[in-house]
DNA sequence: GATGAATGAGTGTTCATTCAT
DNA sequence: TATGAATGAACACTCATTCAT
């Protein structure tokens, strides 16, 4: 592969990295593309050479980030089938990128339908994992016969709520860290007989 | 009362009504004040005669709506202390204004700090009611000794999640109607011994 | 004369008084007519009942003020024909209404041609007085045979300059008071042989 | 130099030139930025690409103009120390840009404090020059021992007065040209023993 | 005569996107 | 490929004046 292409790839990653910094910091919807370009140390126009429009950049950025997240999660999930352990790791992973997920929680309703669908699809894969593990627990008579999808919405909804209003729950630091144990406890309660 | 005053009042309510229509329909943050004026059939400048700025209109609109909601809720709550009944009524009330509460859930993180605080304060009053009723249940040995605030965050977080992503859960109609029973069931599960 | 007319007259004076307060305080060109009405404790529309437009109010206000000033000046001038004395009194009179004359100096170039002409005409009457007195002095061989109009422009120009930039010359208090003696001294110097 | 940069520079100068035309013609404070853009044959938004806001454009415009003026003046001043000659040249320079200085005289009281300070600082440098030359004259016993700062205020105040009310002194053409000799004569008179 | 609600053209400024260089 | 100057529609907000009450 020639130098051109690698350089182009590098610039592209550059932009995404800059966009992510901004995303984590203050969200991207209310940030001008020119500022993203500034942060990436490229010309404003260059941004539109790599992404046809602002939305595409957002889509790519989120996709990259969620991919990384999913990969990490999959590894962790394969090692165990204990719900408490998996949930514990899931929350820890989110905490590690809490800035990102906070913005995601806030901006999600404003993304174009297609992107929103994409993001929710990824989340549904994660739900699927939880679903299976819980299903096993039910079959093994460990958990009660509950409506799993709805229980999971309680879980994801609550996490989403904490994330989107984090500044109202903690002045600084991680919300999820603060409520980590409580979230797990209540969710386990939901599962129990 | 003076005709002048009634007409002014009428225009004001006109504006709020138009704003609410738009609020329910597509949110207000991303709507131009000129469009609100158009919808209210008044001149653009007239809007600023009744509200010093866009934020004030939003604050008033939300305040009016939440007041109505609170009043309704209070009446209902006084009649019973059964959690299931109260929650049932709470959800029904939200369903009746689901468009409004959907937008509120989405835009909340973007409101000025003061307005956000105001809204969350109103919500905290409602939490308080639930808290008391649940506390009673615990003291009467009906419910388990759970962490009430955290349980309530699960409840409100989940409702908020459904509301903010309603279009992703239902193509049309009310999300809360669809998941009404499930929400109640899971929440009661959380309370149980 | 009936009550109506006197009341109307009173309201009119009310408006002018309010306008003057504002004029002295922060100028009138950059003040909204609604604020003038507020200050006068009348309805916004009432202002346009007494004055067809903002300009007319300004014209009247300035005319009233300059009339009072002229009357005062005339009295003082008649008592003496000593230039130093007259100039001294002239400056003292301006000092007593320095806020008014400061604004006048700043806003003068922005008034409609007609008003500007009116104001400058009044000033020309004052110039005339000075002119005559100086002319007498020259004829009595007290002063040098100078170009009187030009000398007077030096005087009025300088006073105008101090007034229009007063905040740059003094932090607070009267500029003319600070430079009172110097102005007189230099002007007398111009007259001397 | 890059074609891009020269073109940008050209547009910038274009804007300043348009702004100056308007400045000379009718002042800039009461002119819309959109009209300046029209005059410069650029899009309205382009103006704000070159200047962050209207004030910055005004500051730059005035700074450029006063710099040119100062440079010219410095050269002239170095060649002689005769007050009459210097004053003569000073007036001639102003006459060459009389439209500009007229507007400056009118708008000065309305500029933001910082810009006003800047302009008055530049003027104070010019005062300084005059001061020194007059001081020399006094030491060489050519001039009387007068209060130099005050005498200079008479000079600058008078010039300012002519400029700000030029349309009232002459129907068309240069005021300063008309009163050029008289200004010099009177000022010399002030200096004389 | 007095009111004050309504008007609507006008303001300075922002920003995603285009395109000549 | 990368650049960055240019665009122009959009925005929230102001204010002298009108006119129905």
Image (cartoon, coloured by chain):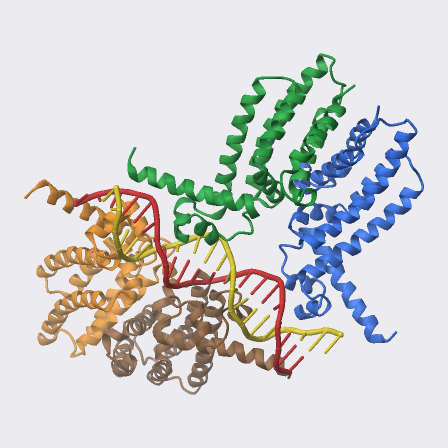
Chain colours: A blue, B green, C orange, D brown, E red, F yellow
Please state the total of marks drawn on the protein image. 0
Q: Residue at x 67, y 32 (%)?
A: B156
Q: Residue furthest left?
A: C1
Residue C97, image x and y in percent?
A: 24, 54
Q: Looking at this view, name the residue that lies furthest to the top.
A: B140
Q: Is residue A164 above or below residue D61?
A: above
Against B58, residue D191 (above or below) is below
Find the residue positioned furthest to the front: B172
Q: Is residue B27 visible?
A: no
Question: Left of C112 or right of it: where is D152?
Answer: right
The quadrant in which residue E5 appears is top left
Residue found 78% across the figure and 30% down from its top: A182
**Quadrant of the image occupied by residue D39:** bottom left
Q: Quadrant of the C terminus of chain D?
A: bottom left
Quadrant into which the N terminus of chain D falls: bottom right
| Viewer-side residue, B64 vs C63 | B64
Front-lying residue, D66 or A63: A63
Residue C12 image point, x, y percent = 18, 48
Question: What residue is drawn where x is 72% and y is 16%?
Answer: B138
The spot of residue D16 in percent (x, y) is 47, 76
Return the residue nearer the eye: C114 or D157: C114
Residue D109 in sight here: yes
Q: Is residue D47 left or right of residue A116?
A: left
Q: Residue furthest bottom?
A: D79
Instruction: Give the x, y percent position of residue A2.
Output: 86, 76
Position above or below: B1 against D78: above
Taking the image as shown, residue D159 lies to the left or right of residue B181, namely left
């Amino acid at each position: 592969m020639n130098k051109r292409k690698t350089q182009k790839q590098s610039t592209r990653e550059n932009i995404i990295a800059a966009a992510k910094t901004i995303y984590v910091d203050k969200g991207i919807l209310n940030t001008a593309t020119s500022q993203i370009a500034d942060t990436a140390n490229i010309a404003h126009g260059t941004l539109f050479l790599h992404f046809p429009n602002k939305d595409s950049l957002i889509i790519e950025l989120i996709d990259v980030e969620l991919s990384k997240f999913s990969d990490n999660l999959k590894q962790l999930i394969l090692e165990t089938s204990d719900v408490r352990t998996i949930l514990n790791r899931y929350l820890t992973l989110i905490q590690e990128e809490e800035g990102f997920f906070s913005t995601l929680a806030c901006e999600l309703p404003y993304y174009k339908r297609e992107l929103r669908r994409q993001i929710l699809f990824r989340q549904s894969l994660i739900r699927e994992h939880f679903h299976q593990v819980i299903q096993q627990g039910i079959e093994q008579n460990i958990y009660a016969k509950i409506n799993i999808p709805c229980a999971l919405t309680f879980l994801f909804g609550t996490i989403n709520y904490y994330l989107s209003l984090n500044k109202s729950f903690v002045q600084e630091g991680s919300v999820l860290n603060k409520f980590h144990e409580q979230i797990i406890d209540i969710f386990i309660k939901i599962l129990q007989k």
